[in-house]
Amino acid sequence: MTLEDVAGACCEDMETCLAGGPEAALFEHESGLILLNAGRVEQDGEEGNLFLTVQFCPFCGTELQTDDDIDAALEAVD
């Protein structure tokens, strides 16, 4: 589901969150996935952001992306 789809199929709260861009807590990745920036983590001596896929809108419960959508997008990412 793309940002345009979300704006038409979901709630105003999600639309507002996604309008914040990639620095926001919720954002649309270039792959089309909607991600939650869960914070910074350190692993194997390296620090980075932890991103979680968002399957359902946290505000209204609408399904934003299916497991198949997520798997397909992750396979396409370099």
Image: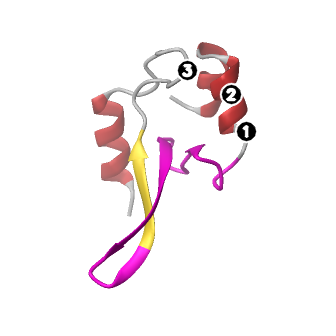
Residue at the image point whose x is 39% and y is 57% from the top? 77
Q: Amino acid at mark 3?
A: Phe
Q: Give the Cα separation between the discs numbered 1 and 2.
A: 6 Å
Left or right, 78 with reference to 3: left
Q: Residues within 10 Å of mark 1 (few under 14, many from 20)?
A: some
Q: Amino acid at mark 1?
A: Ala
**Tag 1 and tag 2, C-beta contact below 8 Å:** yes
Residue at the image point whose x is 59% and y is 44% from the top? 27
Q: Nearer the viewer, residue 7 or 57?
A: 57
| Residue segment shown in magenta | 21-47
Vertical placement of residue 58 versus 24, above or below: above
Left or right, 51 with reference to 30: left
Q: Name the outermost residue toward the bottom.
A: 45
Q: Give the Cα separation between the discs numbered 1 and 3.
A: 15 Å
Q: Nearer the viewer, residue 60 or 27?
A: 60
Vertical placement of residue 69 versus 63, above or below: below
Res 19 label: 1
Res 50 label: none
Q: Amino acid at mark 2?
A: Glu
Q: Give the Cα separation between the discs numbered 3 and 2.
A: 11 Å
As for residue 25 lying within the magenta part, the answer is: yes
Residue at the image point whose x is 73% and y is 38% from the top? 19
Res 59 label: 3
User: Residue 51: where, in percent of width, then height?
Assistant: 43, 53
